[in-house]
Image (spheres, rainbow, N blue to C red):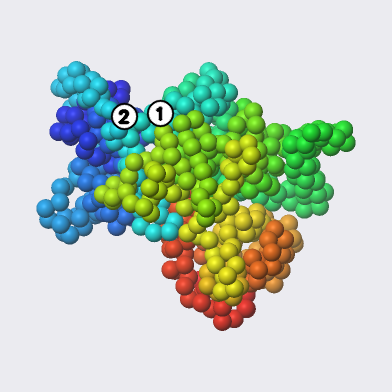
Amino acid sequence: EVARVAAGLVARGLEPGQTVGLMAHTSYEWTLLDMAIARAGLVSVPIYETDSAEQIEWILADAGLRLVITESVALAEIVRQAVAARRAADPQAPVAEILSLDHDALTELTVAGASVPREEVEARTAALRGDDLYSIIYTSGTTGRPKGVELTHTNCAGLAWNGVRWIPDLLFSPDSRLLLFLPLAHAYARFLQLLAIGGQGVLGHTPDAKTLLPDLQAFAPTYVLAVPRVLEKIYNAADAKAGSGAKLKTFRWAAKVAVSYSRALDTEAGPSPALKAAHTLADRLVYRQLRALLGPNARYAISGGGPLGERLGHFYRGIGLVVLEGYGLTETIGPATVNLDIRNKIGTVGPPVPGMHIRVADDGELQVRGLSVFPRYHNTPADAEVFTSDGWFRTGDIGSIDADGWVRITGRRKELIVTAGGKNVAPSILEDRLRGHPLVSQVLVVGDGEPFISALITLDAEMLPQWLRNHGLPEMDVVEASTNPEILAALDRAVARTNRAVSRAESIRTYRVLTTDFTEANGLLTPSLKVKRAAVMKVYADVVADIYSTTKKGPQD
């Protein structure tokens, strides 16, 4: 089927090295087209189905797209708007053709490809070299305009080959089952798909996260791919579902036992007999039901796209689901490091994967080089801001490496806050802890150049009703909740607990509760659910300015 679709692309007159856009939800068809594009010697350019016409116009121009294949007519119309805007700005620009899957794009390609000799497609595939482009992935742009990351066939195929041998129990077993639900336009899901295809077992796709839990039950994966926010929400949902009284006390007792049990596994003595007994009881009362949410076979979760935090890592290992946290960027097409199932150091992102090397610069920045590191940004010269003079990629992340070679991430260099008093503050430590409260959806810590640290907080509209019932409070919406004294008191306590992890100079002194959440739709979250700091700071500049002229808490639109 891949060969037939590849022939169809050739039949449309696309030449080797030209670019094809893919705009669709996670699906078998997305994967089929990605493989066919590569086989025809073309370059795939993923486009998020949530991208606006303006964002697509930028990608059209920067990548020089000749064809865009969308999932639906509705998405095709957005692309047409972008094409029209592009032509208005530059009448000489090439016009990208548009095909839609719900208008039989695959059938159209297959029929057209029937006239192309099989040898022609095979010749294109055989002509590919390791340094030829496989894909251009546009970064999600948490701090600025997206840049096109060029990835070669060596980057992707080489790392996939090594990755299968890195975690063979997960990937190189006939029993392996992975259900993908994160966007394939993101490097994280894309790489795991390549790993699954390069290994053994079964790969499945589900396009809609709203049906994720029943889909997990039906597909029964052996390992799942998740971002930290998803794992956080599962925990918070379980806590809220426990309600109040004895059930809530039982859940929270079991959660503490899970964390204690996991921490004890890392000691020489291991869990005590009393802790083992408590863990066995908690498994019968709580853990089995939690594990069942991910399907009957789930034993591992691979977490990336942001920091998980030790608390969650120990909780999930304690309930019987091992979370292997990794670290990577679009520029490394997936993980540069990942924890091992045979030696999982919770709180770290593991050692470098095969073919990768990592070091810490004098200023604490992590730098990487190796098999999966991209060669350049599209239409942008590689300069000293991107690569060091000896060829190491500057990640922009701050971290450390322990004596065993395991890496720990402490923050982003660009996100590091320097207060007026000269104190360096890594906001992720505070944000990750505060997001652990069931009322909290998103957090942005601010205070660069200011006398103290503060935070913008959004409430979780899904969790709010259950929290109100558990605390005997009447129903209210997010706007009402943002001024409710008992809600604010709960947030005060959450902030106080969060501040215990840092010094007073690094602690959150005050906060504002926003009445609008950060979402992909309003441009304040990336598709992997990371906050777009620059965008939030721009939208809420007046709120931040107000924080430093008054300490009054309250709602902000």
* Residue at 37% from the left image edge and 40% from the top image edge: 374
- Amino acid residing under circle 2: Gly
Give the labeled residue for mark 2: 130
* Residue at 39% from the left image edge and 32% from the top image edge: 156
Camera-side residue of 351 and 486:
351
The residue most toward the bottom is 549
Tell me the element at label 1.
Answer: helix
Q: Position of residue 544 (x, y in %)?
A: 52, 73
The reply, left or right, for residue 239 in relation to residue 144 is right
Tell me the element at label 2.
Answer: loop
Q: Position of residue 439 (x, y in %)?
A: 64, 59
The residue most toward the left is 92
**Which sits earlier in the primary sequence, circle 1 or circle 2?**
2
Residue 489 shows in the view: yes
Q: Position of residue 198 (x, y in %)?
A: 44, 24
Give the labeled residue for mark 1: 158
Question: In the picture shown, does residue 257 fall above or below 397?
Answer: above
The reply, left or right, for residue 270 in relation to residue 502 is right
* Residue at 50% from the left image edge and 60% from the top image edge: 415
Residue 456 lies in quadrant:
bottom right
Camera-side residue of 398 and 548:
398
3D distance between C-alphas at marks 1 and 2: 9 Å
Residue 464 shows in the view: no
- Amino acid residing under circle 1: Gly
Camera-side residue of 522 and 536:
536
- Estimate how packed mark 2 is, as few (under 14), some (14 to 19) or many (20 or more) residues with alpha carbons within 10 Å: few
Question: In the picture shown, does residue 256 fall above or below 112?
Answer: below
Residue 131 lies in quadrant:
top left
Figure label count: 2
